[in-house]
Image (cartoon, rainbow, N blue to C red):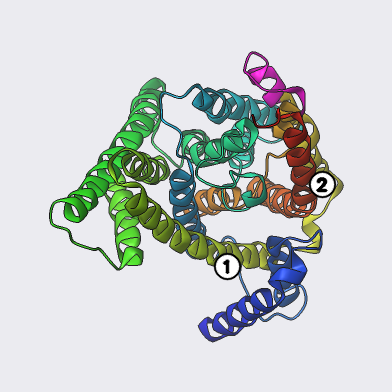
Amino acid sequence: MATRWFVVVGLLLILIGLTDTWRRELPVTAAAIYLIAGHLLGPEFAGFIDLGLARDAVLLEHLAEVALLISLFAVGLRLRAPLADPIWRTPLVMATATMLASVALLCAAGLTLGLAIGPALLLGAALAPTDPVLASDVQVDHERDRDRLRFSLSAEAGLNDGTALPMVLLALGLMGLHELGAGGWRWGLVDLLWGAAGGLSVGWALGFAFSRLVVWLRREREQALGMESFLTLGLIALTYGLALLLQVGGFLAVFAAGLAMRQVERRELPAEDAAYMARAVLDFTLDLEKLAELVVMIVVGALLTREAFTAQTIGAALVVFFVVRPLAVYATTWRLTLGRSQRGLAAWFGIRGVGSMYYLAFAAAHGAGGPQLGWVADAVLVTITLSVLLHGTSATPVMRSYRRSRSRRRPPAG
């Protein structure tokens, strides 16, 4: 199995590397290529890759987990706006109120389809968070990008993978697979409140301390640091590991660590040092992110079966794209400072991907199973597939048109 993975990943990396410039002119994303390749190499066709959700749940959970950690850290590094900046209000609302509205609507849809409350809530919790890995075309272009739409979609994707975890744990609890406490007290205090507040606090503290140490070494000791890749991986691993030991939200912690690192760099380092440090760390994480995207999309493609594409699962995916996401966005952001086109694009670009795959594998690794969970798994995989194809195909031309439209509205300099 390992030998086959080396061959597949190596060939795909070379293919994408050699055709990158040509591929960018086509309405096909790298994620779509990986997904199709995974399906062709999976049990449905070549049988070169043999994966099963129930059998390989722990492996799949860890693969998606690593991909999310790398991407969440990278998203945090991209966001340079001060925390007191009003631009943060929109993504905070979208990562909380919009996500909870999405969970509720999807749970209601699952109950309507005959699912029990636990599987229905798991469906909503797995499909509510947007994706920080596959949304690169709609994210901020650079660290000083102040566009409200791109900033909001980036920060939302960084936050809501962490805020979705308590909903997944609640769903598992309703299925008897996680301790909720009498009346749900443990879930409310530990999983929800402590998980979110502790995760953000731990991540911020470690990212701040790490960055201040770097600043001190460069400024006071005149020590030129190298091995940025080791430092980056070390900070991600330390943050996530400590968060898990303290039973707080690990994804929120890693996102907050990247964010804190960017905030300290913005305030403390000289401009030339800041530019070098940020570029070196961010470039490394973005390269890792592309590799993680490749692996997870191959996995999704290999898990897909023809039987998964039923009228109900396709209908569920379309409901996510055309009903749930727009309703949740419009219902929770109508008082925010978003233009009409910005709100419409935010309603469309609720990309589902690695986060949904992680929570599906997480549930399976924690004992979720049975016919209803099999249907939930099919619905999640079909939704990811259609999201990669629909959102991925539309992202480049739509965002290119959006940029042209915004540039025409700016007053001329001087």
Name the quadrant containing residue 205.
Answer: top left
* Region of the chain picked out in magenta, as a range: 328-341
Front tag of 2 and 1:
1
Where residue 255 sits in the image (x, y, percent)?
42, 43
Q: Nearer the N terminus, badge 2 or badge 1? A: 1
Residue named by callout 1? 295
**Could you say which is closer to the camera, residue 135 or residue 381?**
135
Q: Which residue, as the protein is rendered here, is positioned at the far left?
A: 221
Q: Is residue 332 magenta?
A: yes
Quadrant assignment for the C terminus: top right
Q: Which mark is residue 226?
A: none
Asked if one can make out residue 399 in the rendered structure from this viewpoint, the answer is yes
- Label 2: which secondary element: helix
Where residue 300 sits in the image (x, y, percent)?
65, 61
Query: Is 296 drawn above or below residue 155 in the view shown?
Result: below
Q: Which mark is residue 314?
A: 2
Which amino acid, mark 1? Val
- Which residue is at 67% across, 44% downward? 351
Name the quadrant containing residue 336.
Answer: top right
- Which residue is at 30% across, 61% downward? 231
